[in-house]
Amino acid sequence: MKLSAYIAFLLVSISIACTGYAVYGDEVWYGMNFDYPPESDIRFSVSDLDGCSIFVMHFFNNDRLFWVPTVGMNEHGVFSSLQYQCPMIEGTPEPEPDQLYIYQLFNTAINDCSAVNELECLLDSLELINLYDLTLHALIADPSGNALIAEAGDGENLITGISGDWIVMTNFSNADFIHTPPEEIVGVGDERYRRALSYIEENYDSFGLPQAIGTLETAVNNHAEWGTKASMVFDPLEGIVYIGIDGDFQRLWRVSMGQGIIETWSGFVKYRSALVGGRGITVPELRTWE
């Protein structure tokens, strides 16, 4: 099987109902709800790539026995969330030398960049494309206030830059609704988008960790098949990731990227911690923590 077709097969049902955001105020916060069928496992890892610490959440593809990355942040605070874009647009089976799949942009952002503007030359010189049978878009942000949503167009790159102090991405094409009032947006994830956006707007003046968590809580998907399976709040300046599972925000873990440690943070009977390296720690393992 050719590489692009193989990756497409692995990602074919990725993140059909996820929500991601970046907020810039007195503090900087990113967040992502990963919504996915319950039979697929999830793991969180902190790996070292050429001396750079990188946090990544993967889900497990049960058909190909392969872990697929979908959201992450590196030690420079560069964040990216890879999510399904709907409706699907027929993509390209094999890229030309001057073309780049959206998932490759996601990888480049968290593996190779210390700021979003480092992607400018790449985006100016390469055409973003979709996999043949899977349409994705990526939210990419850094601590300086630079954030964008990257989508593939018809022979052009569709880049939606941050226009204020926050940016939100669900599953409709953001490029299709630039300057459109939120109440007039129609597409997959429009209600989650409005809920998250409204919460951020209402709480922006005092936006801290509780509000960062609250944004994800208000955007939880309770769908029986595509419910929220993992939620992550990212503090890029401190290199900390807060994790909830199964749409439960009463029990939260905290990952220190610098130390490579995951620990209980709130809602637990007793304190517990563990090293989390490149192998990672899975959601079933976390469920055993009391």
Image: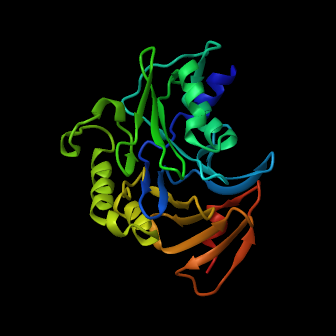
Counting from the top left corner in percent of width and height, residue 61 is at 62, 42
Counting from the top left corner in percent of width and height, residue 79 is at 56, 48
Depth check: give the residue in front, 92 or 123: 123
**Above or below, comparing residue 274 to residue 118 in the picture:** below
On screen, residue 165 versus residue 30, left or right, reads left
Is residue 88 visible in the rendered image? The answer is yes
Depth check: give the residue in front, 193 or 288: 193
Counting from the top left corner in percent of width and height, residue 143 is at 54, 53
Q: How is the image coloured?
A: rainbow
Counting from the top left corner in percent of width and height, residue 180 is at 23, 37
Q: Quadrant location of residue 65?
A: top right
On screen, residue 247 versus residue 12, left or right, reads left
**Above or below, comparing residue 252 to residue 73 in the picture:** below
Is residue 67 visible in the rendered image? The answer is no
**Above or below, comparing residue 182 to residue 42 in the picture:** above
Residue sitting farthest toward the bottom: 269
